[in-house]
Image (spheres, rainbow, N blue to C red):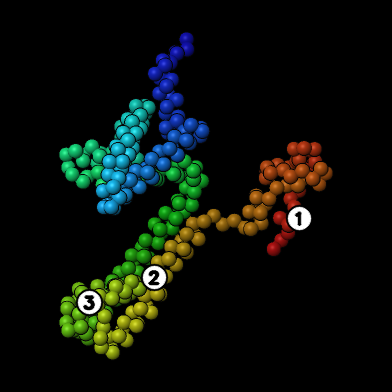
Amino acid sequence: MKETKSRYEIWKQKAHIVIYGTNTPAGRWFDICILILILLSILVVMLESVEEIDRKYHDILLITEWIITILFTIEYFMRIITMKNPWKYILSFYGIIDLVAILPMYLSYFVTGTHVLATVRSLRLLRVFRIMKLMRFIGEASQLRTALKASRTKIAVFLYAVLIISVVIGSLMFVIEGEENGFTSIPRSIYWTIVTLTTVGYGDIAPQTELGQFIAVFIMILGYGIIAVPTGIVTVEYAKSRPQESDKTILQEESPKICNQCNTENYNTKARYCYHCGNPLFLPERDVREP
């Protein structure tokens, strides 16, 4: 005998589909509304930090923030209620972020200024990957992660070499320039070397002697080459991790097959016969031509 579900169970199931799913219009609109609330909340917190705006619209901003917090609180408990295993959501990354997003406003009653921590809601913008159905990019992200993992040893050796260069040149600049020119210690000289090597150049310390300036020019030029090295390492590993496919194969997969009998375009790349007239299919001449 089939077991009938109660109204509460039916409502819970439907709510779960809306809250956690993006395959339905209601689910997509729910997530879009949440994103709008997140953006609005961040905007309100930012405006509160501007003294002139906060002085003039303090009450409106505070009421808006409370309304958003209450809506987020309802959403948080709805997510818990509609889960078969609530702790799975509560202890998840998004669950912790959702909780931290609503706590600051309630804590502001006990600790002044903690509502500013509501800016952590910006982390909830990661939900955009679910809403926009960017799951197809997971493969690309996985390849990038693989490339970074494969190149971590080379990058570590490279950074170690850069650190040695910074220590050696920093110590040399301390001897050449001395305390009278701002190089008061070896650590401070190393700081100047790293700032110059990375082409940041704050300008708080500058060499005054001719030899020191010559070394500075050498470090600046060296910096451009050093910046490109990690990028090159990761790029090579990323290229290795990508599936090797010929241009011909890609064109064959992407181009429609045109029937020479009725000129119908068949977009099913695995089809051998035209769905319209049943005639054998062929690829367009441009797709099968050898490069």
Secondary structure state at the residue bearing disc 2: helix
Q: Tell me the kind of residue under disc 2.
A: Ile
Q: Nearer the viewer, residue 58 or 128?
A: 58
**Which residue, given by chain and number where applicable, does mark 2 sit on?**
227
Q: Tell me the kind of residue under disc 1.
A: Glu
Q: Nearer the viewer, residue 50 or 4?
A: 50
Regarding residue 96, the answer to whether it shows in the image is no
Q: Nearer the viewer, mark 1 or mark 3?
A: 3
Regarding residue 254, the answer to whether it shows in the image is yes
Q: CA distance from mark 2 to mark 1?
A: 46 Å
Residue at x 20% of width, y 73% of height: 187
Secondary structure state at the residue bearing disc 3: helix
Answer left or right for 127 relative to 170.
right
Report the disc number at residue 14: none
**Residue 105 position within the rendered picture, expressed as x and y whole percent measured from the top left:** 25, 39
Secondary structure state at the residue bearing disc 1: helix
Residue at x 48% of width, y 52% of height: 140
**Which residue, given by chain and number where applicable, does mark 3 sit on?**
189
**Residue 93 position within the rendered picture, expressed as x and y whole percent measured from the top left:** 33, 41
Answer left or right for 30 relative to 105.
right
Q: CA distance from mark 3 to mark 2?
A: 20 Å
Residue at x 47% of width, y 41% of height: 131
Q: Nearer the viewer, residue 168 or 151?
A: 168
For the C terminus, give its image quadrant: bottom right
Dot 2, how many residues are within 10 Å of its Cα: few (below 14), some (14-19), or many (20+)?
A: few
Q: Tell me the kind of residue under disc 3.
A: Ser
Residue at x 21% of width, y 41% of height: 108
Location of residue 245 (image quadrant): bottom right
Location of residue 196 (image quadrant): bottom left
**Which residue, given by chain and number where applicable, does mark 1 sit on?**
285
